[in-house]
Amino acid sequence: MRIISDFPGGNCKFISAEYDDKKIIINLEQEIRDTDPWWFYWCFKIEDAPEGEIEFAFHNKKVVCPHGPATSADGINWTWCENFIDHTHFRYNFSENESRYFAFCIPYVLSDFERFYDTIKNDVKRTVLTKSEKGRDLPLLTFGNGKRNIIFTARHHCCESSGSYTLDGVVRAILKNHRSMLDDYKFHIIPFTDIDGAEEGDQGKNRIPHDHNRDYSDSPIYNYTKAIYEYTKNMDIAVFFDFHSPWCWGGLDDEPHLHLGPSVEPTPDLQEKFSKILSDLTLSDNGDNIIFKNHVTHIGEPANKPDAKNSKNFFKYERNANISLCIETPYSGNLKNGYTVEQFYYWGEQIAEALYETLK
Ligand SMILES: [Zn+2]
């Protein structure tokens, strides 16, 4: 048996293995790397496991979601594993020589994006925004012929994969259900602002000296930020959405919420309008969908500082976007089961619908 994490999105430090008559216990912990303080993302693969139960014990605080870890046989199709013991332990019953991935949440790396891109490639133009610090291409998708611009970004905090699935859901829905928006707007999608972190399985949040979502200063340090400054210079921006995931779980972090940008003229109420429409849409749905109860933070609340050098403040203050906000999608949520990829997509579809209704 081997435990590995040297694959895209991998993050795990093996500590030790213990054996008794009935089971194997593997002691491990997440790699914090250059994040300060503590964070919770991890992802590893077991190869060639012996038949029987293995218990996994984490040794750096609570990092197992209430729905258990996400798990996958192929690293592509993920479900939530039911064998939760507590927030530092889970177990799994392996068949002979089974190999299996486990992760804090459903990961999303470049290969996931490439599979999604394959489904929309006839409808979009793909270019490269810039190179990352480690030489990776940052993909940029554009579509639409309008004069005004709509920009969506994800992974300013690279471990926040639920935001990526939500963003894919929004893009898919606009191309499928709201093509009339393409006459009035041009869309710009930047799926990985911190692509190195996403590929290498970093936490990314609170990265030292600061993370990608605190780099919107007069002297940015990341290639992405420098490129987005240049790319959006002189751009007439109607909407900026930045897709995130919140704290690991618990309380309001089990529900989607929005961090609203500063309310400035000439459209101070537009983001509230969007938020209300989105909330009404999810609450009136009778399906097994992600519910948004119009939980928003306004500028000035503790989680939403007016002087933070983040994306939504930049796009509102410096680029005069009519709406500029951050959408937080929980990693696993408070439904009966952990959020599935299809539920993320449908939540994205409802965001697209609400945006369409807001702007029409
Ligand atoms: Zn974030």
Image (spheres, rainbow, N blue to C red):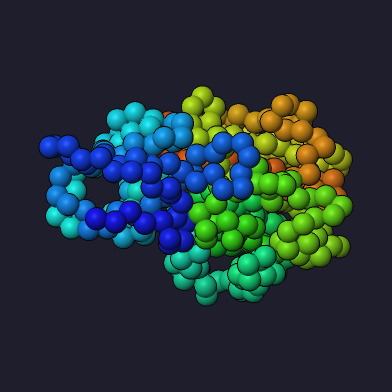
- Residue 214 in view: yes
Q: Nearer the viewer, residue 98 or 360?
A: 98
- 119 or 317: nearer the eye? 317
Taking 343 as reference, is 201 left or right?
right
Percent position of residue 90, x then y? 30, 36
- Residue 334 sits above or below residue 170 on the image: above
Q: Which of the pair 84/326 is nearer the observer?
A: 84
Q: Position of residue 241 (x, y in %)?
A: 67, 49
Residue 11: x percent and y percent? 46, 51
Numbered circles on residues, count: 0
Name the residue at 44% across, 31% down.
62
Q: Is residue 16 left or right of residue 211?
A: left
- Residue 240 location in percent, x, y? 71, 51
Quarter of the N terminus within the rendering: bottom left
The image quarter containing residue 5 is bottom left
| Residue 297, above or below 31 | above
In which quarter of the view is residue 306 placed?
top right
Above-or-below relation of 217 to 131: above
Q: Position of 55 compared to 175: left or right?
A: left
Residue located 63% across and 33% down the image: 276
| Image position of 342 (left or right of 360) | left
Asked whether the viewer can see residue 282, the reply is: no
Q: Name the residue: 77% across, 33% down.
A: 305
